[in-house]
Image: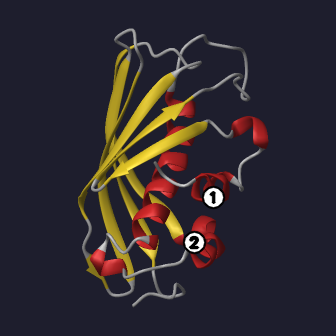
C-alpha cells in the first residue's frame, strides 16, 4: 500500500470534499487505486462518473503514483526525490501535457470505483521527465473508461541524484 502520508500530501492541494482518491497500491510500473465521489461540484448530479471527474481522479492518481515512485527511486531517470521536496513542486512542475484516446465504454458508479495507472515510457530530455501513461477506471458492475496521458515533470528545481 502507498503510505497514508503520501496520499494525504498529494491530496493537500484539493478541497477536502474533492479528495476522491482513498487508497492506492503501487506495483511499479502500475498502481491500483480506490475512489469514491460523494458529490459533484460543477452542477447537477449525473449519477455516473464523467469526463470532469475522470480528470480530477487521474490527476490525484498520477500525483500519488509519481510521488511514491520517485521517493523510492523507481523511475531511474528522475533519481530520488523526497516527499517533502516533491510537494513543493507538485502543482507547478507536474504538467499534464496531453491526454487522449479517452473511451467511456459503460457507466461507472462514482460512489465506489477503482483506477489503474501504468507507466509505459519515461525518458528524460534536458531537465524534464516525460512520463507516458495508460489509465483506466472501472467499478464492480462492469462500468469502464480508459485513456492515455503524457505527464511532464520539470526536474530542474527538484533535488535528484
User: Circle 1 is placed at which residue position?
Assistant: 5
Instruction: Tell me the SS state at disc 1.
Output: helix
Residue position for label 2: 83
Q: Earlier in the sequence, mark 1 or mark 2?
A: 1
Q: Is residue 136 above or below residue 60?
A: above
Where is residue 6 shown, x and y percent of the image? 58, 58
Q: Quadrant of residue 115?
A: top left
Give the residue drawn at x 38%, y 15%. Answer: 143
119 left or right of 35?
left
Query: Which mark identifies residue 28?
Result: none
**Disc 1 + disc 2, Cβ < 8 Å:** yes
Q: In the rendered image of this protein, does residue 143 appear above or below residue 96?
A: above
Within 10 Å of the Cα at label 1, are there few (<14), some (14-19), or many (20+) other Cα atoms? few
In the figure, is residue 69 to the left or right of 77? right
Name which residue lies at 52% across and 24% down. Answer: 50
Q: Tell me residue 133's x, y (percent).
A: 30, 52
Q: Give the quarter of the image for residue 146.
A: top left
Residue beneath the point at 31% across and 71% down = 75
Amino acid at each position: 500500500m502507498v503510505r497514508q502520508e503520501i496520499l494525504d500530501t498529494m491530496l493537500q492541494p484539493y478541497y477536502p470534499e474533492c479528495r476522491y482518491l482513498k487508497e492506492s497500491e503501487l506495483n511499479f510500473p502500475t498502481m491500483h487505486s480506490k475512489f469514491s465521489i460523494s458529490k459533484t461540484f460543477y452542477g447537477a448530479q449525473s449519477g455516473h462518473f464523467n469526463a470532469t471527474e475522470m480528470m480530477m481522479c487521474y490527476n490525484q492518481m498520477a500525483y500519488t503514483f509519481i510521488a511514491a515512485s520517485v521517493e523510492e527511486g523507481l523511475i531511474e531517470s528522475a533519481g530520488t526525490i523526497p516527499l517533502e521536496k516533491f510537494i513543493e513542486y507538485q502543482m507547478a512542475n507536474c504538467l499534464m501535457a496531453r491526454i487522449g484516446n479517452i473511451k467511456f465504454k459503460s457507466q461507472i458508479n462514482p460512489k465506489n470505483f477503482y483506477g489503474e495507472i501504468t507507466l509505459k515510457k519515461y525518458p528524460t530530455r534536458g531537465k524534464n521527465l516525460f512520463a507516458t501513461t495508460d489509465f483506466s477506471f472501472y467499478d464492480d458492475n462492469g462500468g469502464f473508461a480508459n485513456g492515455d496521458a503524457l505527464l511532464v515533470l520539470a526536474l530542474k528545481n527538484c533535488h535528484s541524484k
